[in-house]
Amino acid sequence: MRANVSVSNSLMKPFRRSVVVARAALRWPLAERSNLVLTLVALAILLGSSVWFFTAKDDRGKSARLTADAWYYHAYLPSLVFDQDLDFVDEYKVTKNWYRLGKTPTGRQANVFGIGPTIYQLPFFVAGHGLASLTEDRADGFSKTEVKFSLYASLLFSLGALFFGTRLLARRLGGRYGPLAVALVVAAGGPVIYYAIRQPGYAHPFATFWAAWLVDYWDSSFRPEDSSPRGQRHWVCMGLLIGAASLARPQLVLWSLLGGYAAVSDLLRARALGLERAAVFRIVRSWFIGAGCALLIVLPQLFAWNALYGSVVASPQGEGFMRWGESAWFETLMSSRNGLFPWAPIYALGFIGLLVGMRRHARICSALILGLLLQAYANGAAWDWWAGGSFGGRRFDSCYIGFAFGLGVLLLSPWQQQTHPGKRFPALRVASVGLAVFSALLAGANMNFASTQSAPTVRIYGGQSASSILRKSPSLFGATAGWASSVSNLPARLLFAWRNDVSIHAYDRVVGVHVLGELFPGLNSFRGKKREPVDLNPTHPRVTGLERTSGKNLSPSGRVRILVGLNRVGPVEVYLQLTGEPPTVHVNGEKLLVRPLDSPTGAYSVKVSRYERGSNRLDIQSSPGFILSRVELRTSVNAAGHTPR
């Protein structure tokens, strides 16, 4: 009898604990006046963002709709709920398979997008399906109600990320209203708001949410009063959060570095307490249990890969898509056309804040900086390191909470009385107020840009820098954002100009602009080019040493430098046509063999086998005053170096 009572009590413990938590949550708004204010503000944010979500329009109708990648994420839902087969033949008849994805080795229709976002949208989809079954003639997974319910999850998960960002800032930096304001401004000043409201259905809201929760939970275990190693329950929870983040987007597994920080902390605590070997063994065992929990959560993705591609570990885009040895990590942060900081200068402020915070918050700031750099390296290793047609640096979704903390260091730290008891820093506080106004202007410009675009992409703008586009926002918002965007990558532009002996404007027009087809073969419906002429306009920043005289491109010094962007593998032929002595050609400082093709016309060919991923220096030298008529790049292979069938 006692055994049955004991078992009953153990089963009721989680329920009782949930009841206690629920009661505390309901009483919290009325406990203090500030709590009530925060609750009302949170409700206002939810209401306002929901109204924007359901009413925003563009030239093609309601902006919150399935577009591009979202079609592929959504295709999992009817396939799982209705067919249970992960075969997208029926779904692609509706979505039209925009990217022209073919069949996998298992004979199924390919879907290179992860199943994780589908798992998180599933409850919303089921609810929408139930309502659609009662109110609509169509309830096949693509009805308006089913789609709208599924997309609404993007907004709710994004708002959840704000909650964890606010809680982290309040715990480490103090304040009542400031943490929420900072978390909100950073979300409005980057890609978070766009993929929550304007282009929902992507993986980014879910990645933002789970990464924010993971960082917040990890940080909460570093309380001064906790001198003992973390228990098994903590490691189970951390493992579940790491798994949930990795399921949202596989690259977020890199945030398991937080587990390394916690593990080292456990060992240091165990050493300080003088624990015996058996106790240390239990600590290590907890680590493995947490890792097992993480693996358990990502099993749906492993099963999906196995069903589609015949392997639990797969690169759905194809072999060679990830170029780990040639990561363009710096470009992902700094590129004027594609970089994170130029498109979201408020993130650059957050990064500066993380560096400043290293003095007083070394542990969390170092972890967040390392996590950011790992994400930059992974993003740069992807073939399309610019993230395709994207609104800003969307693939840095998991770093939102890090940038929020960094900006919080700059704005909230000067108001911390507990850090310097009895001391005041009026100059720093005045500066923080000015910086807060500046940040609000950046967020306003980004929101204006987000609200006026249906599917913005730096590729569509044909080479314009982020600063020139952000300046189009109204009045002071545009001027502030444009200036901040330009300053955010000024060091990169200066370094590029010095290394290549070009003007400071060349970086904006060269980096991220590729020729001969830059997209990964088989992942898109566009064919790569076999020939592409290089623009020899002497006024273009990529060209130095040429002058336009009588309609001809003349080189007074006999030296011409052309910067050429390449994002491909395999040999490339440079075709030259000039009037003058036979040229000498160098690519990135390496002298290459020049083969004459037609002496009377001055045609030459240069085979280039080795070149950089990104900008390359093509130096042509001949007699002073030679005329350069044509430069053309040619190839017989596709961007991946394979001969097309």
Image: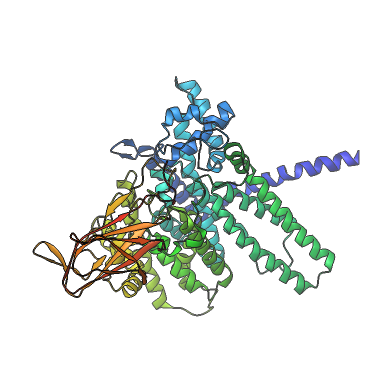
- x%, y% of residue 394? 43, 52
- x%, y% of residue 86? 56, 32
Horizontal side of residue 542 vs 353, given as left or right? left
Q: Residue furthest left?
A: 550
Q: Is residue 72 above or below residue 413?
A: above
Nearer-the-camera pick, 190 or 551: 551
Q: Quadrant of the N terminus?
A: top right
Q: Is residue 46 visible?
A: yes
By what rule are the colours in the image chosen? rainbow
Horizontal side of residue 23 vs 115, given as left or right? right
- x%, y% of residue 262? 66, 64
Q: Residue furthest bottom?
A: 423
Residue drawn at the location 51% of the way across and 62% of the way down: 325
Nearer-the-camera pick, 142 or 324: 324
Residue drawn at the location 49% of the way across and 58% of the way down: 399
- x%, y% of residue 306? 62, 40
Q: Residue furthest front?
A: 599
Horizontal side of residue 310 vs 505, given as left or right? right
Dividing the picture into quadrants, the one containing residue 495 is: bottom left
Residue drawn at the location 42% of the way across and 55% of the way down: 570
Horizontal side of residue 40 vs 516, given as left or right? right
Q: Is residue 447 above or below residue 299?
A: below
